[in-house]
């Protein structure tokens, strides 16, 4: 996206991730960190956004390679200095919290 290089969505379930992807018109690989977190750890509530941030730091945009039926982009990309990460989590009722982080140093 133009605003963020990475997005971490609360893994409240596949439907939540699918709805975010569809409503934000994101490329299919963009929420792979969220999908991989759900695949590996299940729904760990809003804490999932921290698992996803670690998955981005480890795998960059190649998270889809680590789960069945994962989606991969055309070009490999790692987390780089200056990248912006949007973390968004949902709570019960009509609650939504988000934070934007800027990477101070890239992944090795």
Image: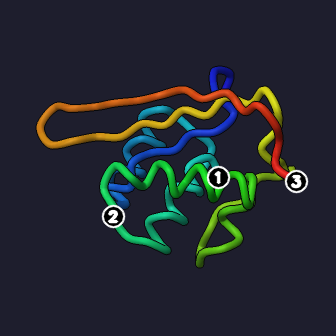
- Residue 42's place in the image compared with 89, above or below, is below
Q: Are marks 3 and 1 in contact (CB under 8 Å)?
A: no
89 or 29, nearer to the observer: 89
Q: If you read the primary sequence from the N terminus, does the residue marked by circle 2 or circle 3 appear first?
A: 2
59 or 81, nearer to the observer: 81
**Mark in the foreground, 1 or 2:** 2
Residue carrying label 2: 43
Percent from the top left, x then y, of residue 19?
37, 45
Percent from the top left, x then y, of residue 82?
78, 26
Residue lying furthest top: 3
Element marked by disc 3: loop
Percent from the top left, x then y, of residue 86?
54, 32
Scheme of colours in the image? rainbow
Mark identifier at residue 108: 3
**Is residue 27 rendered to the left or right of residue 35?**
right
- Residue 74's place in the image compared with 20, above or below, is below
- Residue 4's place in the image compared with 53, above or below, is above
Q: Dot 1 surroundings within 10 Å: few (below 14), some, or many (20 or more)?
A: some
Q: What is the CA distance from the residue labelled 3 to the residue labelled 1?
A: 21 Å
Element marked by disc 1: loop
Image quarter in which the N terminus is found: top right
**Is residue 88 rendered to the left or right of residue 28?**
left
Q: What is the CA distance from the residue labelled 2 to the residue labelled 3?
A: 29 Å
Residue lying furthest bottom: 68
Element marked by disc 2: loop
Residue carrying label 1: 29
Q: Dot 2 surroundings within 10 Å: few (below 14), some, or many (20 or more)?
A: some
Percent from the top left, x then y, of residue 68?
59, 78
């Amino acid at each position: 996206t133009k605003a963020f290089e990475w997005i971490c969505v609360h893994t409240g379930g596949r439907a939540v991730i699918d709805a975010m992807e569809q409503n934000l018109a994101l490329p299919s690989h963009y929420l792979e960190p969220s999908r991989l977190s759900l695949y590996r750890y299940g729904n760990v509530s809003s804490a999932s956004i921290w698992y996803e941030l670690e998955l981005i730091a480890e795998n960059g945009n190649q998270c889809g390679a680590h789960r069945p039926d994962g989606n991969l982009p055309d070009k490999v990309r790692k987390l780089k200095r200056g990248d912006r990460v949007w973390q968004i989590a949902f709570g019960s009722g009509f609650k939504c919290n988000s934070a934007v982080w800027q990477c101070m140093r890239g992944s090795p």
